[in-house]
């Protein structure tokens, strides 16, 4: 680890190769306490997500964090010459799969790899703009919506985090969707009818970040059958759930101006319709 952030086995195959930096990461949401925290000297590289191959086949597809100490600047016209590395985990010398069935990955350790971000630190917005994490226009849009959600909550009592249903026992539907198929996200009202009062369908929340995709048509990127649960570090099974291509969380409920991680959103099949 460097500053408590693991260099994972899935990252070894990228050693010696050239990539474009997609964004500088000044803060990140962690999924144990669900808070936004400060992270330093870290970037994302274009389109490099974790494939979960060393972590039980986790299918969440998180963007990989890269410390700047693991990188060096280069001329894009220069042939870097790929370093010959072992792309399996056979010779990876650090612990990542523990004997008790727990896994160590960047998401499970993100709480320790980040620091407290005080609410009075208004410099977070300037850092986002300077790092080109957000444009001024997008930052204003995210902040405006976050304020609106909280204002609505004060007036109506509705949550600013998720949609609220009325079911005591939520229904399910199995479509057996496969990667490459087209689906349409059902209407907001149809989805609310499948949720309990905590906004969940069989434990999976339909968050406010997902509302903007209602009625849209998207490609299925893949199934979500198993994933690492960060608070327990355990690999858990998931049923009747898929990930949609380029449909990611923007953290629009956050007064910090969204979240730069662009995590994939998880969709129960009962929230979707197969289309031609």
Image (cartoon, grey):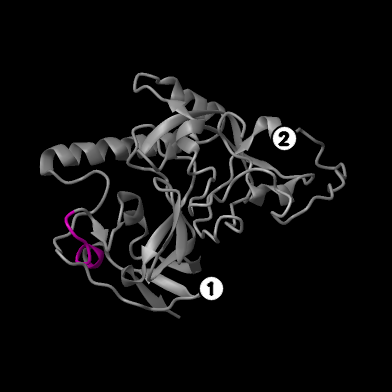
Q: Where residue 224 sits: x, y (%)?
A: 46, 65
Residue range (magenta): 190-197
Q: Nearer the viewer, residue 237 or 145?
A: 237
Q: Disc 2 on helix, strand or loop?
A: loop
Q: Is residue 192 magenta?
A: yes
Quadrant in which residue 106 is drawn: top right
Q: Where residue 143 sits: x, y (%)?
A: 35, 35
Q: Residues at badges 2 and 1 in contact (C-beta under 8 Å)?
A: no
Q: Where residue 181 sits: x, y (%)?
A: 49, 75
Residue at image point 60% right, 32% down: 42
Determine the residue located farthest toward the bottom in the rendered image: 276
Label 1: few (<14), some (14–19) or many (≥20) C-alpha neighbours in 10 Å: few
* Left or right of 112, for residue 16: right
Residue at image point 48% right, 51% down: 102
Report how far apart the C-alphas of labels 2 and 1 lie in the structure. Answer: 34 Å
Quarter of the image containing the N terminus? top right
Magenta region, main secondary structure: loop
Q: Nearer the viewer, residue 50 or 90?
A: 90
Quarter of the image containing the C terminus? bottom left
Residue at image point 27% right, 35% down: 147
Does 190 sit above or below residue 109?
below
Quadrant in which residue 159 is drawn: top left
Say the numbered circle drawn on residue 180: 1
Q: Is residue 273 magenta?
A: no
Q: Earlier in the sequence, mark 2 or mark 1?
A: 2
Q: Nearer the viewer, mark 2 or mark 1?
A: 2
The residue that label 2 is drawn on is 71
């Amino acid at each position: 680890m460097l500053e408590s952030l693991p260099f994972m086995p899935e990252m070894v195959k990228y050693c010696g190769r050239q990539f474009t930096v997609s964004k500088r990461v000044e803060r990140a949401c962690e999924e144990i306490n669900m808070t936004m925290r400060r992270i330093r000297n870290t970037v994302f590289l274009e389109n490099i997500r974790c494939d979960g191959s060393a972590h039980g086949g986790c299918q969440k597809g998180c963007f990989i964090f890269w410390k700047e100490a693991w990188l060096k600047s280069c001329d894009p016209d220069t042939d870097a010459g790929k370093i010959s590395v072992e792309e399996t985990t056979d010779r990876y010398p650090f612990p990542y799969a523990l004997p008790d069935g727990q896994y160590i990955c960047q998401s499970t350790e993100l709480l320790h790899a980040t620091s407290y971000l005080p609410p009075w630190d208004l410099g977070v917005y300037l850092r986002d703009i300077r790092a080109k994490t957000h444009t001024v226009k997008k930052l204003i849009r995210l902040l405006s919506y976050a304020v609106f959600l909280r204002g609505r909550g004060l007036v109506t009592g509705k949550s600013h985090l998720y949609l609220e249903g009325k079911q005591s026992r939520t229904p399910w539907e199995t479509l057996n969707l496969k990667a490459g198929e087209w689906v349409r996200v059902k209407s907001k009202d149809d989805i609310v009818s499948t949720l309990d009062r905590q906004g969940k369908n069989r434990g999976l929340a339909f968050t406010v970040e997902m509302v903007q995709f209602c009625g849209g048509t998207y490609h299925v990127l893949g199934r979500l059958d198993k994933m690492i649960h960060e608070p327990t570090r355990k690999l858990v099974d998931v049923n009747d759930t898929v990930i949609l291509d380029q449909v990611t969380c923007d953290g629009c409920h956050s007064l910090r101006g969204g979240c730069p991680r662009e995590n994939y959103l998880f969709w129960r099949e009962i929230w979707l319709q197969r289309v031609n």
